[in-house]
Image: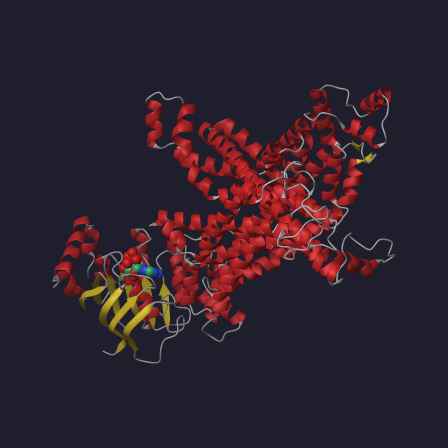
Amino acid sequence: MIRELLRRPEALLGGLLLLLIAGAALLAPVLSPGDPLAIAGRPLVRPFTDPAFPLGTDGLGRDLLAGVIHGVRTSAAIGLAAALVAVLAGMLVGTAAGFAGGLVDEALMRVVDAFQIVPGFLLALAFVSVTGPSLAVVAIAIALGAWTGPARLSRSRVLALREADFVAAARVMGMHPAEIALRQVMPLALPPVLAVTAVIVAGAILTESALSFLGLGDPNAVTWGGMIAEGRNQLRSAAYLSIIPGIALVLTVISIYLVGEALTDVLAGKRQS
Amino acid sequence: MTSLATCDRLTVRYPGAARPALADLTLALHAGEKLAVVGESGSGKSTLARALAGLLPVGTALSGAIRWSGPPPRPGRDIGTVFQDPGASLDPLLTVGAHLVEGLRAPLPLGRAEARARAAALLARVHIPDPERALAAWPHQFSGGQAQRIAIALAIAAGPHLLVADEATSALDVLVQAEIVALLRELCRDAGMTLLFITHDIALAGTLADRVAVLHDARLVEIGPAARLLAAPREPYTRALLAAQLDLASPRLVGTRP
Amino acid sequence: MPRLLRRVATRLLGSIPVLVIVVVGVFLLLNSAGGDAVDAYLLSIGGGDAQQAEELRIRFGLDQSVTARLALTLAQLARGDLGYSVALNRPIGAVIAERLPNTLWLMGSATALSFALGSALGVLAGRRPGSAADRLLSAGSLFLYSIPNFWLGLVLSVVFAVRLRWLPVSGIETIASGKTGLARAADIAQHLVLPVSALGMIYLALFLRVMRAGMVEAWGQDYTLAARARGVAPWRITLNHAARNALLPLVTMLGLQAASMLGGSVVIESVFGIPGFGRLAQEAVAGRDGPLLMGVILVSALMVVAANLLVDLAYGALDPRVGGPR
Ligand SMILES: Nc1ncnc2c1ncn2[C@@H]1O[C@H](COP(=O)(O)OP(=O)(O)OP(=O)(O)O)[C@@H](O)[C@H]1O
Ligand SMILES: [Mg+2]
């Protein structure tokens, strides 16, 4: 599979980019030791003019490169955490609905409908404003708008599997329905959900950046959205303050899409042959 | 007996395929005859049909030649094609009338009103009841047999001299199948059309065709008059094919030869 | 027509329980917060004594139990009354009615733009899958799809408003310009160019990809091959058969994106200082105004329901196979 991936130029590009980004996230304390929010030098050093600050400094003299490197940790952590929560919650609800059927199914699916007709971003906004911004809250807030996709996907898969022979066999053996649902059926509903996980992670990163941009991110963490918002006040004189973290954001999201798309393609091709 | 088309050592290889779908095929199609092509799935029957109808996908490698007696035929105008699944070969979003008007105006210089008038006549010709109403109906509102009649009307719209029917009856149940076969026979007789009838049902081929060609593994195994080929096959493969079908056998088909 | 009406009625009735779930859910969420609008309000006017707070709470019914207030809220909303905003000191319905048009213009234009351009470019890309045009457009759409809308808004305004000065930086119209009629419409249109582009770009990319996928699907179907066999001109097969069929999944996608686009307009309105419905959501959060936030969320949900109903009707009109409900 790896070899197949390597044959696609766009997957290769995305993969390299993603490796670079993951490396930055893991090695952030080594690459840029110290507090990225601390004042490091003169304010408003332009990018590519001072080797000490390759990407320049902001209005307070904070190193932009350090911000970008530490921001990737926030983005990655929240993107992965939100996707994990969304996938887990969605699969549990979808499996329960599909496996139980009847009224339970009907009720759970109306809840799914309810979450789908409320704009996820508004829900996240409301949740963060009520609970107070912290990394965990932001991740859950984002997951609130993202779990319905996995729920629907796993439900339809479970509906198809419910009458399978192995389920009947497990019933005959006296296994508890909940155990059958969780241990036997749910894992089989994973592939279609995994296929959309990259999209969920990328979407979560975008939503987090929008929340931080509106000032609803964790105030103690460096976030790209927050950096873009701060730079906004100097848009006329120092647009690079907003543009540079935005580029980091775009590159991260695009690399996830590229890798995710290639993975889905390769897996789909595998299933066909 | 003039030949309409001749395949000369025709070899067809689809893009990216390891093996050719047709290899070294030499075969003449006589004007006015009904030639059946039989063979198991994957033997290259549809490939032959598509090569003759000019419908091979782009990037397909062709060697050898197809020689036509006249100028190269234009799809729709000189060759009509009928496909296996009548439901799928009609666009679900267009009315039957829109299909026919489009099909008539593509090869012929007709106005919209003229095309519409001819469309109703075409439907009557393939025995669709109440053609005027059928023109306004959608494909999904017809049964498989009726949809196939409509597809046939579309194929013969411009009065082609060759009709290619690629498994045109395979998706239908036996009674409807017999009706469609009868319709094809009638249309060929009335218009003097040549018919290339593709099927995997060798007995059906025998009831309809003048000659039968047997394909196996991209190659032509045997070709000859229908009666002779069914009664006294020369090649072991043809014999095996016949034996396999007679085993499954419906006495009906054995008895229907005139 | 009666069948159509019945379909609309069934859909609307079916969405009532879902809307109730929304209201109850949002109510419980908002009530789990410490501190309420009265606290926030008193803080904003520089403080007040306990008695004043108590009076305000009684006036807005904030002194009762959670279940009692939930029942009150449901009954009130069922009457079509969205309540009173403490933060803005105005009826919520009136505020929303005032803000909604701006957002509808923004979203409507962004939808129209992204749908028209996205489907047209999707046809161009899907006309011959694998062609140079296709690869360029597919790569370009993936890139556009990865750009956060608020950042795109900032970049566009740096380039076109700040540097080139072609377009206004913010607002929905020139304040106190005294313009009326067509001149005012042109002024608003000018103000909308950048926000609409910023909001619509991601959907343009999405619609392009969905349209292209639909075209690829159509090329694999017998009806395009059959049309070729009939001698129908390639451009005609592309437009009349492949594109027409590819439009169906695109229409479905349009309904699915309504909620996401409303969320996007919150941020875009903030970037471009448009006094719209999305900004109202932000103001409700900032003012800790629960009823206002409830009103905003409920009206958004209603708009999503309406959008999906419209899409459903459009789908029914486009696809003859769709008869009754579902
Ligand atoms: N578009 C294509 N690209 C690549 N290979 C193809 C394509 N179409 C057909 N083939 C291959 O070419 C061979 C011959 O196919 P063809 O469709 O001519 O067979 P057939 O005799 O019509 O079979 P069937 O009875 O199943 O219709 C098969 O091995 C098939 O897999
Ligand atoms: Mg075939």
Q: Position of residue A60 (x, y in %)?
A: 72, 46
- Above or below, B227 against A104 in this view is below
- A174 sits left or right of B240 in the view: right
Residue C106, x across and y down, in percent? 71, 51
Quadrant location, ligand no. 1:
bottom left
For residue A76, side relative to residue C225 (left or right): right
What is the x, y in percent for residue A58?
Answer: 69, 49
Quarter of the image for residue C161 reads bottom right
Residue B65 vs residue B85: left or right? left
Depth check: A18 or A164 in front?
Answer: A18
The vertical placement of C39 against C105, above or below, is above
The x, y position of residue C24, in whole percent, is 65, 28
For the image, the number of numbered tags is: 0
Q: Tell which residue pokes out farthest to the bottom in this image.
A: B70
Is residue B167 something that shows in the picture?
Answer: no
Instruction: Say if A40 sits above or below B154 in the image.
Output: above
The answer to whether residue A231 of the structure is visible from this angle is yes
At horizontal 87% and vertical 54% (from top left) the residue drawn is: C176
Q: Taking C41 as reference, is C1 left or right?
A: left
> What's the image's color scheme?
secondary structure
Q: Who's the residue at 69% across and 43% down the image?
A: A39
Seen in the picture, residue B51 relative to A50 is either above or below; the reply is below
Q: Nearer the viewer, residue B43 or C143?
A: C143
At 72% from the left edge and 49% from the top edge, which residue is drawn? A43
